Image (spheres, helix red, strand yellow):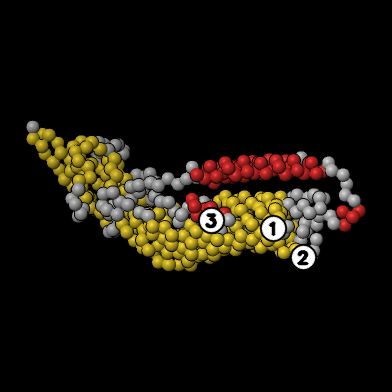
Amino acid sequence: MFIAKILKMLKYILSLSLFVFCFTARAQNEEKELTKEEKKLENKGNPGIAIGIDLAPFVTHLFSEERFGVEANARYTVNLKWQGVAEIGYENVEIDDEKMTYSSNGSFIRLGGDYNLFKIDEVGNNDNILLGLRYGLAIQDHECPRYTINEGYWGDYVGALGSSTVGSHWVEFVFGLRSEVLTNFYMGWSVRVKKIINVGTDSVLEPYSIPGYGRRDNSTNLGFTYTLEYQIPFKKK
Amino acid sequence: MKFKIIGQLLVVIVIVISNACDNSSLCLSGQNAIQSGLYSASSDEDKDTTLSGFYMWGIEHPTDSILLDSVKVSKLYMPTDINRDSTEFVIREEKLVLGEVKGVNDTIQFIFKKNLEYVSGDCGFTYNLEIDTVIHTYNLIDSVVISYSSVVYSENIENVKIYIEP
């Protein structure tokens, strides 16, 4: 039910953002041509390296208390069109309910690139509409010190599964918006469709959640990021 | 205009995929029960039969609790004790003969192998069973055939045919 609400909210944010960008782009296209002086300064996409954090894991923790994570990213803007991205993070899962006691600690890295669809000649406008691809890899230690199988007549069965280290990997298709809110400070969000390639298992125990991917029960997950970034520019403006 | 077309296309893709992903898991209970059908031993073909005044309870049950108490049955859901590798039941049919209650008992034992399986994060674990042998006495029961030896989570298939004496 909550996921449905979030998806609905994302849909409206997405539609609204696109509308705003379309409107802005259209209005700006109607402006007069750039002067020679301005053309020297024309938009080259603000090349540089940006580092940032993702606030989405904190929001996730509010609604899925068993999961706690942090995530940081580095973005290398090559030119107006292309950006290389690396994202790293950590996730801890602690579950203690009638079905099982479970814990997991793991880290992940995502590598990939974004293509900027938003091209505008306005000097100083470094906003981006991004389409991207990521490859994700996670390694986690997890264990299940207790699992309980309910049996109404004979009584419950209680067992345990020891600790193991497993690796999983996946791909993500990214759509996002990124905007320079202050000089070299960017704020952005992205919606991601994640498709699992392989889930690591070395026993019956499977990960409850894969760091960076989300709930393991789904072979396709929908993800969301909300990032704050600082860009170290290559050259002075 | 270009952005608008791309944007609308992406919105549709995101909505379609997100809806496809929204599959909330439903946890099932009683998935360790052996499903048995009662058949008449007097018929050449498999023909369902019904027993009235039917009782069933597990042997070595911690509280000697009765599972079925004077009911009419044609199918049995026989829960297994997954703390052990076998489960034994007493089945009893009571009939009123000339104003007097007469009962016939049988014991039936299922010997099985267990395989632990992870169902999901929400539903936890289950044991799937592979029925190896069925041993029984011959008062009410004529014979028993294992028709489908696997007891698997979320499958609803008859595992055993119990042929009842005419």
- First-in-chain label (2 vs 3): 3
Residue A135 is situated, as x and y percent measured from the top left of the image, at 63, 60
| x, y percent for residue A196 | 56, 55
Residue B113, image quadrant: bottom left
Say which residue label 2 marks.
A234
Check the image and report above or below for B55 versus A36. Answer: above
Q: Which residue is mark 3?
A: A58
Question: Please, is residue A13 above or below residue A184 in the view?
Answer: above
- What chain is tagged by disc 3? A
Q: Nearer the viewer, residue B154 or A30?
A: A30
Q: CA distance from mark 1 to mark 3?
A: 21 Å
Packing grade of label 3 (10 A; few <14, some 14-19, many >=20) is some
Outermost left residue: B99
Label 3 amino acid? Answer: Phe
Instruction: Name the residue rendered at 70%, 53% in the picture.
Output: A181
Residue A131 is left or right of residue B31, and the answer is right
Name the element at disc 2: loop
Badges 2 and 3, same chain = yes
Q: Residue at x 29, y 52 (%)?
A: B80
Query: For the point 10% across and 37% down, which residue is it?
Result: B101
> Could you say which is closer to the camera, residue A229 or residue A117?
A229
Quadrant housing residue A42: bottom right
Amino acid at pointer 2: Phe
The residue wearing badge 1 is A185
Going 71% across and 61% down the picture, which residue do you hit? A231
Chain letter, disc 1 residue: A
Asked whether residue A207 appears in the rendered view, the answer is no
Q: How far apart are the two marked residues, 2 and 3, measured between alpha carbons?
A: 32 Å
Helix, strand or loop for disc 1 = strand
Foreground tag (1 vs 3): 1
Tell me which numbered mark, 1 or 3, is placed earlier along the sequence: 3
